[in-house]
Image (spheres, rainbow, N blue to C red):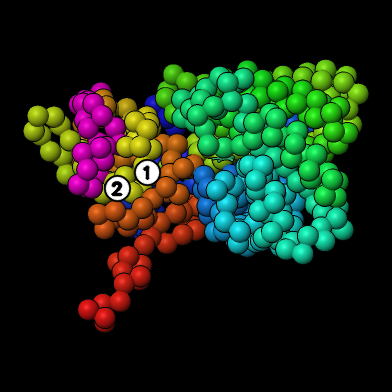
Amino acid sequence: MRKLPFTREKLDEIAAKWPTPFHIYDEKAMRDNARRLRKAFAWNKGFREYFAVKAAPNPHLMKVLKDFDFGSDCSSMAELVLAEKVGNVGESIMFTSNDTPAEEFRKAWELGAIINLDDITHWDFLLDACLPGRDAAGQLAGRVMCCRYNPGPLKGGNAIIGKPEEAKYGFTREQLFACYEKMKAAGVKRFGLHTMVASNELDPEYIIDTAKMLFSLAREIHEKTGIDFEFVNIGGGIGIPYRPEQKAMDFEYVSAGIQRAYDELVTGGGMKPLRLYMECGRCITGPYGYLVAKVRHVKNTYRLYAGLDACMSNLMRPALYGAYHEIVVPGKEDSTETSVYDVTGSLCENNDKFAIQRVLPVLERGDFVVICDAGAHGHAMGFQYNGKLRSAELLLGPDGSVREIRRAETLDDYFATLDFGAL
Ligand SMILES: *Cc1c(COP(=O)(O)O)cnc(C)c1O
């Protein structure tokens, strides 16, 4: 059973002020993890994690991560604005978007972000959007330009992100060489190389292989085009152990494997030093966020149902991917009396279930139910279908204090885009 950073008594105290459901993040555990990641990769001068903002787009969480020099990986206007608000500008932003509108390129350009192109046609599109006069050379010299590589059939698939050759993202190999040549000819002098091929990957070898692939490719492109890369970005996708039998990724092991590859392919290959970047979301905040709900009704029909006051608008992953999330019932952790439940929300969709046929302590109305690993791609995926409102986000400080970092939505928020006066 998962150990929670709060007791049932503490939850009573918190819920007296912020009614359930809410998301709560454990700041101390998040900091410890961020520190450990940085330390593991300290061998690489200039190593940087760009937190994937989409995983938990809350400026208060981003600010905690900024203490560890984490930049922001953004892919939309709103995410660029969030990065700007927490003071991540310039090369502290990696703008990795796809199907990108011109105004987002312009915003990223104005902020001085590292622009990571998703397609070869986006190079001209970017110039049209940001440098319409095309007197580009002067302005391009200081810019870092990056391309996203899609290895296609050269790299095996991964359950969530799918097979690279079926993925809409990135350049083919041939396009990469062509685009770097074009950018060089236009006056770009600073380059990076990116890929993102995994999601929720728990096999450390997959991450090490991704780094190897980019080191080799950077060398090949360097040899063919003469450009020197400043960094390679291996993307995000490091998984977390949602299931009790799974093991967390060992950062030190992954780092040692990547360092060996670096020594062989980069240093040994006669290349200039490369900075290693990554843009993880899930493993940065995922395990440190909890969705806290209460049992609203227990229903006994063909199955036993525990209906919560939270629903899939608070956490979509189980409904969307059949994802498993551990559930803890604070105060009943040691209970030997158990039953088998489908744990549901109130949405009029039968897949609105946090768990199916799960063995849990016998539940009663009013019991707290804590859904673990909700700190990434959790609150962020929320929606308002069926008139459901998104919950508050709270931050549990290292000293045990609790702070609201996003209020719960109200009906006024829900109706804010309607004009009833015009009826
Ligand atoms: C989603 C995403 C990430 C973060 O992925 P995690 O699985 O949360 O680590 C990083 N980079 C890009 C381009 C993404 O789309």
Q: Quadrant of ligand 1?
A: top right
Camera-side residue of 274 and 332: 274
Whether residue 407 is in magenta: the answer is no
Is residue 201 visible in the rendered image? The answer is: yes
- Residue 299 at x, y percent in the picture: 12, 38
Image depth: mark 1 or mark 2 in front:
1
Q: Quadrant of residue 173?
A: top right
Whether tag 1 and tag 2 are in contact, CB under 8 A, the answer is: yes
Residue 190: x percent and y percent? 83, 45
- Asked if the beta carbon under badge 1 is closer than 8 A to the nearest atom of ligand 1, the reply is no
Q: Which residues are the magenta region?
A: 336-357
Q: Residue furthest left?
A: 301
Could you say which is closer to the camera, residue 376 or residue 329? 376
Query: Residue drawn 57% across and 52% down?
Result: 100
Residue beneath disc 1: 315
Residue shown at the point (34%, 31%) measured from the top left: 322
Marks 1 and 2, the one that precedes in the sequence: 2
**In this view, 422 is above or below 116:** below
- Crowdedness of circle 1 by 10 Å Cα count: few (<14), some, many (20+)? many
Q: In the rendered view, does 354 fall on the left or right side of 245?
A: left
The picture places residue 224, in percent across and down from the top left corner, at 84, 28
Q: Is residue 102 left or right of residue 370?
A: right
| Circle 2 residue | 310
